[in-house]
Amino acid sequence: MKFVDEAQITVTAGNGGNGCISFRREKFIPLGGPDGGDGGDGGSVWLQADENLNTLIDFRHQRHYRAQRGQNGMGRQMFGKAGEDVVIRVPVGTEVINVGTDEIIGDLTRHGERLLVAQGGHGGKGNVHFKSSVNRAPRKATPGTEGEEREIRLELKLLADVGLLGFPNAGKSTFIRAVSAATPKVADYPFTTLYPNLGVVSVETDRSFVIADIPGLIEGAADGAGLGAQFLRHVQRTRLLLHLVDLAPFDDATDPAEQVRAIEAELRKHDPAMLEKPRWLVLNKADLLPEDEREARAKAVVEALGWKEPWFVVSAIGREGTWPIVLKVQQFFDDQKAAALEAAEDAAARAEMARGG
């Protein structure tokens, strides 16, 4: 399915129903008094995260969502029926932005989570509310208020554990095919990946992680060049980055270390916090070099970068060296989970001691 990660829609909540002006007209009750009921509230518009959705493509076909209007009040103190809400399903990981103010309204990160994006109008008051000792037959009622209308932008950020970074043709699509069941398009030319691909990497039962193949970045991506600008946001939520670089570029003038620095510069311009994420270096396409040259070339790149994080030499197309990376990534997440659990247990123990003290 084609990946769509951004959509703009208009949401309109229902107006509140009008209050009613009415008087009792019953036999043997000459002074029945006012009995006009209130109008019903208008329906609201909600977004709800659904883990069964993974694109925003449906919003390309429907761009306006309108909730139901509240019913007007009626005589005999009968209140109008409230308008029905509209609930719009969106993928988990959808960020919602007010187009008019460019403010973030909310972020839907859990299945079933709801976000109110347009509040329904309130129903008007019937004349039964305006009766007093000096006005026993009020001919006054209030209209319902208007429901909110808002233009919103939906942005889907991939909820992946691992993000693959690298220049076009660095072998990211081939890598994700090697370690997961994902089948992104692979070819021998730049910009093969036009949309992000997700793959689930399974180590064993109950031990797996999600990896995202992000379209190739080029210099100037943060300023809008190439395909990478609109996809830089996808790496913001990942917990670990694998930075792939071609160890054996066809052009002898191309320096793998300089390619790494260029991508780092784009990350820094887009969001400096992304450089603080754990990032491991994966030197790919080792199969294109003689075996006696691979290690020396890899060490030269690592030394030129002053790289401190883990680094690997692989041939993704031949699946050489990819499994050790998978195991190390899984161990990284297992350690994170264990540390979080230990911290939660320590916090609970301290809270219990405080209550006991």
Image (cartoon, rainbow, N blue to C red):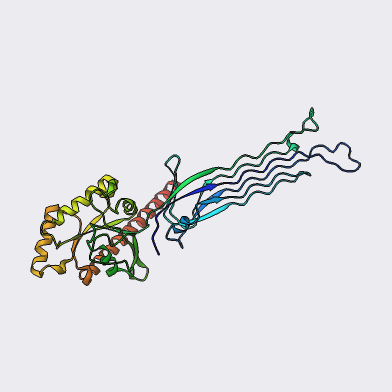
**How many numbered badges does the structure rendering display?**
0
Q: Would you say 45 lies left or right of 247 here? A: right
Taking the view exactly as shown, the residue that stands out farthest to the right is 28
Q: Would you say 224 lies left or right of 33 here? A: left
Looking at the picture, how far across and down is residue 312, in whole percent?
19, 63
Which quadrant is home to the C terminus? top left
Q: Would you place residue 241 above or below residue 11 in this image?
A: below
Q: Residue at x 29, y 66 (%)?
A: 176
Q: Is residue 324 visible?
A: yes
Q: Would you place residue 14 above or below residue 93 in this image?
A: above
Q: Would you say 81 lies left or right of 66 here? A: right
Looking at the picture, how far across and down is residue 249, in whole percent?
15, 61
Looking at the picture, how far across and down is residue 71, in whole percent?
68, 47
Q: Residue at x 13, y 61 (%)?
A: 298
Q: Would you place residue 191 above or below residue 17 in this image?
A: below
Q: Residue at x 28, y 60 (%)?
A: 332
Which quadrant is home to the N terminus? bottom left
Q: Residue 255's image quarter?
A: bottom left
Taking the view exactly as shown, the residue that stands out farthest to the top is 134
Looking at the picture, how far across and down is residue 24, in whole percent?
83, 41
Q: Residue 135's image quarter?
A: top right
256 and 159: which one is in front? 256
Q: Would you place residue 3 above or below residue 27 in this image?
A: below
Q: Residue at x 49, y 54 (%)?
A: 113
Q: Is residue 271 visible?
A: no
